[in-house]
Image (spheres, helix red, strand yellow):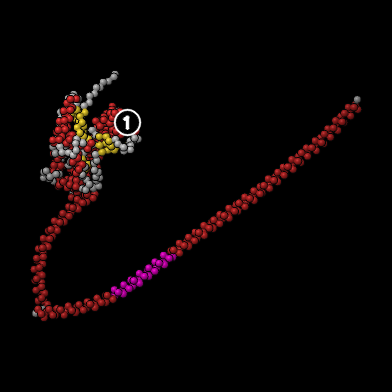
């Protein structure tokens, strides 16, 4: 039994040894195969790396060669350009040297010619001196007088002539003194004009409002034209909506009405809600804005003219002149320019510059209210100045600037001169516009004179007058009679081309509030 166990153990040991030997040999072969494969891959990687490096090296060498060749070509081109530039510079220098040499030769020839002329002049001077001596000797023989006697005779004649010429000279000097005074006065005026740079913009009778698109035109007109009628009725202007792209033209001779209409229309376009009630609201807001603008313009005019301490009401009246024109010239700008001219001329003459500017600014202030009150703009201006405690110098300047009364100070004369300069400057005024606006104003005055008329507006360049009547005072039947009477009065009192359409508008409203 023991022998069997030993035999089994021995068999197991031998089997284990053989198995281990075979396993070791197998693992060695596998390992050797893997090592050989890895070495072969390593050699391939190294070969590929060497090949890639060689290719990269060749590419870099080619790039370096190309860059070197390009740099060389650029350098050669630059050298060639420099060489050409140097050659051109050498040619210019050579040409200048040749010109200098030619000029030098010409100067030398001119000097030689001048020397020859100088010698000839010296010889001729000597000959003239000799001939003069001979002439004096011959004269003494002929006249029988010595040189001294001839001198005394000549001096007496010269003395008589000098006395006569002195009298003429004194008279001429007096005339020259007057001319110099006139010249000095003109210089003062010219200097004042040159130093005063006021703008002159002729007032027009239209304003243009830009629209975001052409669809807005239909909204402005409204259903059956109710929106445009309301806007024209409230503002007294004429809205022209034609084929002009993205624009509406506001026509009217009164600048305040045009400004109110323009502001109201722009607000309506921005707001987008366009209907009669909204139009009335926007017109009221626009009227308030224009009132604020009038005050602002008056303050700006006083600041621009350098006039301080004006009464607040005077400033408001001044601002209204922004919307008043005289022969197409803006009255406020004209007054500011007159103030500046007066100040400049007063400075030249040593007068009170502040008073001169004040008188110049206020000289036409009556024009701001002459369409509302009776009297000339001169008398109205004097009344305003007296009401707000202006000085007597200013009042006299306002009263005398058109020569109605005698000026009592130099400042009043300066106001006359400055007013003439500003009005007479070419382009400052336009006669036709003043005639046009006067005709429109006369047309509105005629219609406003009838009983029951609330207000009226002349539109379409005076070819139509729109009359708003009070519903409680004028019935529908009375409107027909009133239209005929107004047309008849226009025919009798006005001269106009073509025909004028009289349009009577009577509108009744009922308003209540839901609480």
Pointer 1 residue: 219
Question: Residue 231 at what x, y percent from top left?
Answer: 26, 31
178 on left or right of 81? left
Up/down of 46 relative to 457, above or below? below
Question: Residue 88 at what x, y percent from top left?
Answer: 44, 63
Q: Residue at x 18, y 79 (%)?
A: 131
| Magenta segment includes 108 | yes
Q: Most extreme residue toward the front, as rendered?
A: 498
The answer to which image quadrant residue 465 occupies is top left
Q: In the picture, which quadrant includes the N terminus?
A: top right
**In-front residue for pair 239/8:** 239
Q: Residue at x 90, y 27 (%)?
A: 4
The magenta segment: 90-115
Question: Residue 385 at what x, y percent from top left?
Answer: 16, 38
Up/down of 504 relative to 344, above or below? above
| Magenta segment includes 504 | no
Task: State whether residue 417 appears in this view.
Answer: yes
The answer to which image quadrant residue 177 occupies is bottom left
Task: State whether residue 383 appears in this view.
Answer: no
Q: Is the magenta stretch mostly helix, strand or loop?
A: helix
Q: Residue at x 44, y 65 (%)?
A: 90
Question: Residue 315 at what x, y percent from top left?
Answer: 21, 37
């Amino acid at each position: 039994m023991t022998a069997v166990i030993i035999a089994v153990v021995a068999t197991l040991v031998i089997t284990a040894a053989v198995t281990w030997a075979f396993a070791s040999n197998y693992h060695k072969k596998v390992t050797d195969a893997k090592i050989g494969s890895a070495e072969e891959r390593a050699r391939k990687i190294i070969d590929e790396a060497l090949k890639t490096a060689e290719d990269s090296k060749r590419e870099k060498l080619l790039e370096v060669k190309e860059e070197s060749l390009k740099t060389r070509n650029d350098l050669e081109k630059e050298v060639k350009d420099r060489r050409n530039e140097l050659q051109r510079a050498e040619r210019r220098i050579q040409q200048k040297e040749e010109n200098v040499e030619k000029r030098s030769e010409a100067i030398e020839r001119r000097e030689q010619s001048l020397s020859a002329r100088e010698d000839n002049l010296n010889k001729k001077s000597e000959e003239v001196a000799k001939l003069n001596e001979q002439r004096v000797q011959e004269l003494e023989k002929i006249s029988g007088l010595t040189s001294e006697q001839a001198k005394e005779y000549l001096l007496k004649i010269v003395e008589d002539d000098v006395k006569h010429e002195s009298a003429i000279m004194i008279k001429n000097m007096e005339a020259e003194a007057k001319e110099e005074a006139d010249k000095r006065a003109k210089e003062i005026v010219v200097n004042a004009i040159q130093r005063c740079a006021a703008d002159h913009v002729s007032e027009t009778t239209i304003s243009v409002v830009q629209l975001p698109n052409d669809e807005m035109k239909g909204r402005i007109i409204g259903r059956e034209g109710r929106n445009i009628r309301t806007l024209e009725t409230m503002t007294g202007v004429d809205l022209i909506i034609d084929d002009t792209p993205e624009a509406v033209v506001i026509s009217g001779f009164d600048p305040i009405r045009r400004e109110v209409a323009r502001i109201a229309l722009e607000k309506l376009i921005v707001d987008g809600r366009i209907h009669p009630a909204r139009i009335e609201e926007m017109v009221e807001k626009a009227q308030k804005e224009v009132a604020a603008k009038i005050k602002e313009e008056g303050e700006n005019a006083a600041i621009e003219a350098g006039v301080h301490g004006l009464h607040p009401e005077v400033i408001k009246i001044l601002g209204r002149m922004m919307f008043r024109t005289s022969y197409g010239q803006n009255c406020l700008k004209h007054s500011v320019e007159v103030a500046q001219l007066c100040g400049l001329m007063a400075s030249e003459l040593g007068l009170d510059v502040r008073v001169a500017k004040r008188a110049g600014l206020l000289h036409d202030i009556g024009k701001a209210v002459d369409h509302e009150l009776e009297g000339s703009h001169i008398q109205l201006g004097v009344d305003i100045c007296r009401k707000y405690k202006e000085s007597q110098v200013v009042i006299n300047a306002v009263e005398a600037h058109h020569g109605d009364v005698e000026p009592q100070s130099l400042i009043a004369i300066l106001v006359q001169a400055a007013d003439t300069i500003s009005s007479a400057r070419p382009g400052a005024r336009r006669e036709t516009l003043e005639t046009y606006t006067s005709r429109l104003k006369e047309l509105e005055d005629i219609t406003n004179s009838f009983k029951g008329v609330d207000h009226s507006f002349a539109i379409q360049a005076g070819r139509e007058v729109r009359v708003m009547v009070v519903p409680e005072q004028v019935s529908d039947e009375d409107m027909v009679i009133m239209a005929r009477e107004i047309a008849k009065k226009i025919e009798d009192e006005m001269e106009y081309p073509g025909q004028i359409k009289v349009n009577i508008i009577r509108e009744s409203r009922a308003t209540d509030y839901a609480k």
